[in-house]
Amino acid sequence: MAGPLKKKKLGKRARRGKPIAQVAALPYRRAADGDTEILLLTSRQTGRFILPKGWPMKGRPDREAAAQEAGEEAGVVGTLHEQSVGSFHYWKRLKDTFVPVTVEVYPLHVQQELDEWKEQKYRRRAWLKPDQAALLVDEP
């Protein structure tokens, strides 16, 4: 489901040239060897590797919405950074069109991986070195 912006509204906003925004978490941890690892997960529909992301939530800071998405989609909990580390753009597939989306990314230092989480039967998690994650992440 498209969250606060229903898919029909997304198409209308795109046709009017209005920006469409999403928020994402960049889950990371320190491995036993001291290296940083990045968590990617598979998308529900295509199985490609992505960051946990979703729609901004009314009345909540974007970074908190990103953390909630990380919990629901990837089953991780941790400490959020205050500031975004940047953004990326992609084309979101809708039923009969594509809409441009800008995603603001917030780092999440993972302290806990849940054994059970909301979307676990739809997704797989993978901890990767940053260069591997950069090669595998696949936004359409």
Image (tube, helix red, strand yellow):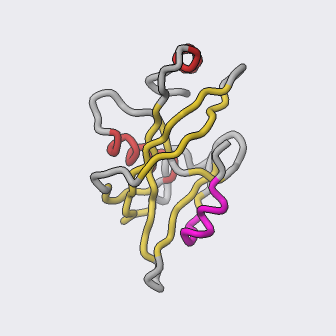
Q: Is residue 42 above or below residue 7?
A: below
Magenta segment includes 134: yes
Image position of 93 (left or right of 111): right
Q: Which percent across, then down, holds residue 82?
A: 27, 52
Residue visible at 36% across and 50% down in the picture: 84
Residue visible at 29% across and 35% down in the picture: 60
Magenta segment includes 132: yes
Would residue 24 be visible to someone looking at this image?
Answer: yes
Image position of 53 (left or right of 45): left
Q: Nearer the viewer, residue 100 or 8?
A: 100
Q: Which percent across, then down, holds residue 76?
A: 44, 57
Q: Is residue 69 above or below residue 56?
A: below
Residue visible at 37% across and 40% down in the picture: 65
On the rendered image, what quadrant is the N terminus found in?
Answer: top right
On the image, which quarter does residue 122 sit in? top right
Residue visible at 27% across and 29% down in the picture: 59
Image position of 60 (left or right of 55): left
The part of the chain drawn in magenta is 126-137
Would residue 71 be visible to someone looking at this image?
Answer: no
Q: Nearer the viewer, residue 63 or 74?
A: 63
On the rendered image, what quadrant is the C terminus found in?
Answer: top right
Q: Which percent across, then down, holds residue 3?
A: 48, 27
